């Protein structure tokens, strides 16, 4: 059923559709609860894994998944209808995919990881992850 919905939005992915459903559900819950986060300019952010594999790169070259976490904000203000929600979430995800941020983060993390003790690295990663409201993953 999800693939049927995806096929109605050219260029979209199953993850785009599922992320839009999640965004709509969260917005509905926040509206029902009268949560002030909807009025806050920062809203709700989600962390998700971004594949760093190049198109056509085989799993053998990367020994499986090669990912880094990135984030997006749920575009609650742009989600007038369910259709608007899919397009708005897709735009957010496409911006993340087109950005070099995940690659830069991966390079920095690799460099930093070599310099820190295990305990220091754990504190560093905890600090990085603390900036997200939700962690999404299908990996």
Image: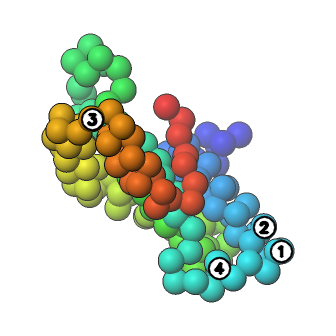
According to the image, label 1 marks what residue? 32
Left or right of 51? Residue 93 is right
Q: Earlier in the sequence, mark 3 or mark 4?
A: 4
According to the image, label 3 marks what residue? 117
Around disc 2, counting alpha carbons within 10 Å, would you say few (fewer than 14), some (14 to 19), or many (20 or more)? few
On the question of residue 103 being in view, the answer is no
Give the residue displayed 62% in from the left and 86% down from the top. Answer: 39
Q: Earlier in the sequence, mark 2 or mark 3?
A: 2
Marks 2 and 3 sit apart, C-alpha to C-alpha, by 42 Å
Give the residue displayed 63% in from the left and 62% down from the top. Answer: 23
Considering depth in this image, is 99 or 118 the residue closer to the camera?
A: 118
* 126 up-or-down from 37: above or below: above
- Answer with the quarter of the image where residue 43 lies: bottom right
According to the image, label 2 marks what residue? 29
| Callouts 2 and 1 close, C-beta under 8 Å | yes
Identify the disc placed on residue 38.
4
Marks 3 and 4 sit apart, C-alpha to C-alpha, by 40 Å
Q: Earlier in the sequence, mark 4 or mark 1?
A: 1
Around disc 1, counting alpha carbons within 10 Å, would you say few (fewer than 14), some (14 to 19), or many (20 or more)? few
């Amino acid at each position: 059923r999800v693939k049927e919905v995806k096929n109605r939005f050219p260029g979209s992915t199953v993850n785009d559709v599922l992320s839009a459903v999640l965004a709509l559900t969260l917005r509905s819950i926040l509206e029902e609860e009268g949560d002030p986060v909807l009025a806050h300019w920062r809203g709700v952010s989600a962390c998700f894994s971004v594949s760093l594999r190049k198109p056509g790169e085989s799993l053998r070259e990367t020994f499986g998944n090669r990912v880094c976490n990135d984030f997006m904000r749920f575009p609650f203000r742009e989600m007038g209808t369910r259709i608007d929600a899919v397009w708005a979430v897709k735009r957010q995800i496409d911006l993340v995919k087109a950005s070099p941020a995940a690659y830069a983060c991966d390079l920095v993390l690799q460099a930093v990881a070599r310099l820190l003790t295990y305990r220091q690295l754990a504190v560093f990663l905890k600090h990085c992850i603390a900036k997200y409201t939700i962690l999404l993953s299908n990996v």
